Image (spheres, rainbow, N blue to C red):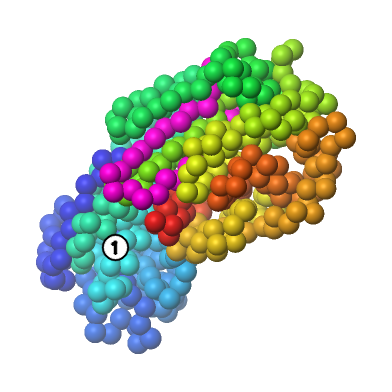
Amino acid sequence: MGVRVVEKLIQNQKVMSEINGGEYSHILFVLPVRENGLAGIAIPYHEKLNAAVTRRGMKMNELIENPISCDLDHGAMAVWVMLDISKSRFEQLTIMRKALDLLLTEHPQQLAISVYGNEKERRNAASVGLYTAWVNGARLMVRKKKMPPKPLKSITLFGYKDPGKFADLKAKADGNLLARELTLLPANELTPGLYRERIRHLAKVNSWKVIEFDMKKLRKLSAGAFVAVAQGSADEDAAIVRVRYTHKDAKKTVALVGKGICFDTGGHNLKPAKYMHGMHEDMNGSAVALGILLAATRQKLPVNIDCWVALAQNHISPKAYKQNDVVTALNGTTIEIIHTDAEGRMVLADTLTLASSEKPDFMIDFATLTGSCVTALGNRYSGVFSNRDALISKALDAGIESGERVCAFPMDSDYEVALDSKVADIKQCTLDGEADHILAAKFLQRFVDDTPWIHMDLSASRCDGGLGAVASDVTGFGVAWGMRMLKLTE
């Protein structure tokens, strides 16, 4: 989304003059919280705001929870909201989304944001406002005969100027948008083969190096866990794709791993229609990993990133893997197949083995892996697991600071008893489903060697009505968290 931002550190009278000139049809006023209301703060159209608050029977400080809108005399639409810097990042992003939604539902091509308060308050308001406008102002994937209105093209920011900080925000927003764009694509437009083509194009634009491990290479490497799932597809287009970004000043290398199941039927353990619907989004983990890679590239983050995406489909066919098969993974571990709908952990197993063999400083994998994590958390948090307590602590901090909240789950060794197999080194899962999100993480741990590692189960990849800054049901959750995690571990 090519949204330009014009930053103007000008006085109140100039704001009113420019707005009254008719250039801006949609204006957001972001106000600070004060115990004495807004006394002493010169706000354009204060009389309009007072009248709107009085008409609704509100108190001024209720704008913290309920932004309000009204039309100005020259026909522009104005929205007022209060941003409380004492509240969590998630709460601030949520109220900003509600405020901007009042404006963006009219699909403006130009937007003005005017921020008030002391320097800290204005800087914070500008950051939250711009990021939220960027992630919601773009046109997402749609295949209608009548196309929706054009997306947001420009934002004018009044009251604060910090181009370096906002460039980083724009990069993060672009990463979120890439993750959502890929996730929304229908399965017939994002087969593993077509996905690989998109990655090659992204790599060319962003100067990434790409290495593809296709089915022929994976069979030669004895990557039996990945191949077991991918062999059910008629097209031999599945692959593990490695995409690399390097920086001359990097002191660390991070591996990002993403589950890219482009459609999940459940295999021989076929999903019912209710649960198969939406399974084109089962590649969301790979989209999040690529979104972080894009954001880091555009921020020129001084870290080397190896992004590994496992691209396949879980189809039903005479060649598809089945219950009670025993397959041998890339690292030599034998796996007893218990349920063919637990395919995500299978493709990740060999991908994690490849990623860890490169000896990164630490590794994060992203996957829409288990229904039990959704059962445990709903769709407003995602679950994190790790083999290092220090990484869990940083993961929780990154969730608080990014506004993408995570919950840590246990990884105690006694959970592994449930995965004991009589015929193989490990069971793929159990049939009763109890604590499957934890068992899946314990299964994956067998394939990371001793690499410091975090697994994110993306229960918040989709949330009806949006989540935090993001207004669409598909949230792109994990990109903002991942960017914060990279900076905490620099």
Q: How many numbered dots are placed on residues in this image? A: 1
Name the magenta segment's main secondary structure.
Answer: strand
The magenta region covers 237-263
317, 80: nearer the viewer? 317
Q: Residue at x 28, y 67 (%)?
A: 123
Q: Residue at x 81, y 32 (%)?
A: 424
Magenta region includes residue 26: no
Tell me, yes or no, if residue 454 can be seen here: yes
- Residue 421 vs residue 384: left or right? right
Quarter-of-image position of residue 11: bottom left
136, 62: nearer the viewer? 136
Q: Residue at x 18, y 58 (%)?
A: 7
Q: Helix or strand or loop: what does disc 1 sit on? A: helix
- Residue 31 vs residue 397: left or right? left
Residue 253: horizontal and vertical position, in percent? 42, 45
In the displayed structure, would residue 30 be above or below residue 402?
Answer: below
- Residue 184 vs residue 159: left or right? right
Check the image and name the residue furthest to the right: 422
Magenta region includes residue 238: yes
Residue 433: horizontal and vertical position, in percent? 80, 44
Q: In which quadrant of the rendered image does the C terminus lie?
A: bottom left
Amino acid under disc 1: Ala
- Residue 214 vs residue 31: left or right? right
Q: Residue at x 54, y 40 (%)?
A: 356
The residue labelled by disc 1 is 126
Q: In which quadrant of the rendered image does the N terminus lie?
A: top left
Tell me, yes or no, if residue 480 can be seen here: no
In the displayed structure, would residue 245 be above or below residue 312?
Answer: below
Residue 58: horizontal and vertical position, in percent? 44, 76
In the displayed structure, would residue 454 be above or below residue 219?
Answer: below
